[in-house]
Amino acid sequence: MSYYLTDYSATEVELNDGIRSYYYKKCYCSVELQGEYIVFTSHRVENNAYRQSWTIAYTDFTSPTGSAAAVLAAIQTIIDSYAGGSGTGSIPHGTASGTDTYVVSITGVTSYNDGDAYLVRFPIGNTTGATLNINSLGARDLYRNNDGPLIGGDIEDGGEMLVVYNTTITGFQCIGTSPNTILAYVTNADSVTITKGQPVYAFGGTGDRMTVKRANNSSDATSAQTVGLVFSTSIAANQKGFIMLQGLLDGLSTLPTSTWNDGDPVFLGATAGSITNVKPYAPNHLVYLGFVTTASPGAAGRMYVRVQNGYELDELHDVQAQSPTNRDVLYYDGTVTQWKTASIATIAGNASASSTGVLTSTDWSTFNGKVTSPWAFRLSGRFYTPSTNALAIGSLPNVANSVRYSPVIIERDITITQLGISVVTIAGVGNTARVGIYSNNPATNQPSSRLVDSGTIALDGATGQRIVTSLSVTLTKGLYWFAYFSNAATGTVASIANLNLPDVIGTTGTLNNGLITGYSQSLTYTNLPATASGLGNIFSGASSYCIYYYY
């Protein structure tokens, strides 16, 4: 691209990028050389809203032209000619050197006089309090316009400020510092004077100002709207002054080294207008005010103010607990992904449960008298069948291309590591079977999604057990379905009578047909289906394939 930068007027430069022109106030501009690139920066526009920077190869300039140094010098000359240079009526100006202890040469300045103003560009920002020495007349402290001495970061790299000499403070007041501090002009609505460093909360408003009172952590009303700390030396009742919302607050006598250390957190205290470094806990309210940068036994304490209000439980975005009653508990409602409060009876869905949430002697007797299923007593490290009874195992012929599902109730959380069958008579050469476990669809009490497929199990060769190891199927207590699937039309495997399976399906048909005890699904032999479908009923009186499980 082709760029040119020209002296557009006494106060502005024009930068054209080959497409359009941009106009910048000279007094806000700076230029530097980085290798073969010219870095031209407008540090702020007239309302101090933003800065804009251009990085351009010096060879891309059509005006000015020359070596990198020549282009840099030509642009610097244009910038330095702002406001008519040293002509009558211009603001005396110059570019400072150094860091923190700044030195600048300004034409015509022979002494410091009250009210004299100078425009000074600072190529390097400050890291702490700073001084300015004009024409070797002596270093003088730099102050924020109405906010004490400068602190680190008040001057940004390449920034420009108007410095005004003040004989009262024997230093320069600076206009145009970086926004290190946020202040608010307020009215004290309290009945007493509030003093520097006291935390305050938003109480109301009057005209164009917020009204404040001393904050404390003993209630939500006096803590939730904590906005800052008093910045003015004091603000009498019904009078106006400044509070600090964010920034470095100095001159504090409330941070003695006997109780405070540098780096301590600062929290809202329990009495009106107090602070503490001891983290409050319920029933008091947690409000973080900032942290100590300098503890001091005198009036030289400093802290960085950054108020962060804590929250009530019922103010959290995923908690519905606005109207709890006595002895309610907190529980999670997955249907709305929210935490809620309710009584134990409501959560358990048991209207007869104790309304106090505490088990009575009658409740204990009732619970202790309950008899659990025998399945709950099954020990780990053994094989089990889906049967509830220790009855004789029969045999059932293979049925090719048909998945058979049998219900099984798991009474405790387990991880199944092995599945197996027992071949009673061998099938044809190359015939195999698969066994698996499916989840239950609670809406229909039918098998739903496949949890595991054992892979192929040989049905030919010798009779006897066939065990698939190295499984890991974690089941929580509940209803599941075991599946048997083969491509064999001959041979038999061990079975259990359906009368030994849990009656979890029932029937809506003619009673003398018996109850439904399982399901079948016609399917060309392959992997077990990912989802059971097209199910047909299996009625009582028949047997089911016996699938052993181990955990």
Image: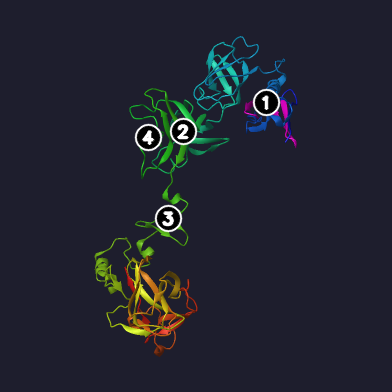
Specify few, some or many for label 1: CA neighbours under 10 Å numbering under 14, 14-19, or 20 or more.
Answer: some
Give the mark toward the camera: 3 or 4. Answer: 4
Pointer 2 and pointer 1: residues touching (CB < 8 Å)? no
Residue beneath label 4, please?
A: 276
Q: Earlier in the sequence, mark 1 or mark 3?
A: 1
Give the Cα separation between the discs numbered 1 and 3.
72 Å
Residue beneath label 2, please?
A: 305
x and y, in percent, of residue 109 in the image: 63, 11
Give the Cα separation between the discs numbered 4 and 2.
14 Å
Pointer 2 and pointer 3: residues touching (CB < 8 Å)? no
Q: Earlier in the sequence, mark 3 or mark 4?
A: 4
Give the Cα separation between the discs numbered 1 and 4.
58 Å
x and y, in percent, of residue 392 in the image: 28, 83
Q: Nearer the viewer, residue 539 or 244?
A: 539
Give the Cα separation between the discs numbered 2 and 3.
35 Å
Q: Which three-letter amino acid code belongs to the residue tagged 3?
A: Ser
Q: Which three-letter amino acid code belongs to the residue tagged 1?
A: Ala
Q: Which mark is residue 323?
A: 3
Q: Nearer the viewer, residue 191 or 436?
A: 436
Give the mark toward the camera: 4 or 2. Answer: 2
x and y, in percent, of residue 83 in the image: 71, 21
Q: Earlier in the sequence, mark 1 or mark 4?
A: 1
Main SS, magenta residues: strand
**Image: magenta residue range:** 12-37
Q: Earlier in the sequence, mark 4 or mark 2?
A: 4
Pointer 3 and pointer 4: residues touching (CB < 8 Å)? no
Give the Cα separation between the discs numbered 3 and 4.
32 Å
Residue beneath label 1, please?
A: 68
Q: Residue at x 35, y 62 (%)?
A: 344
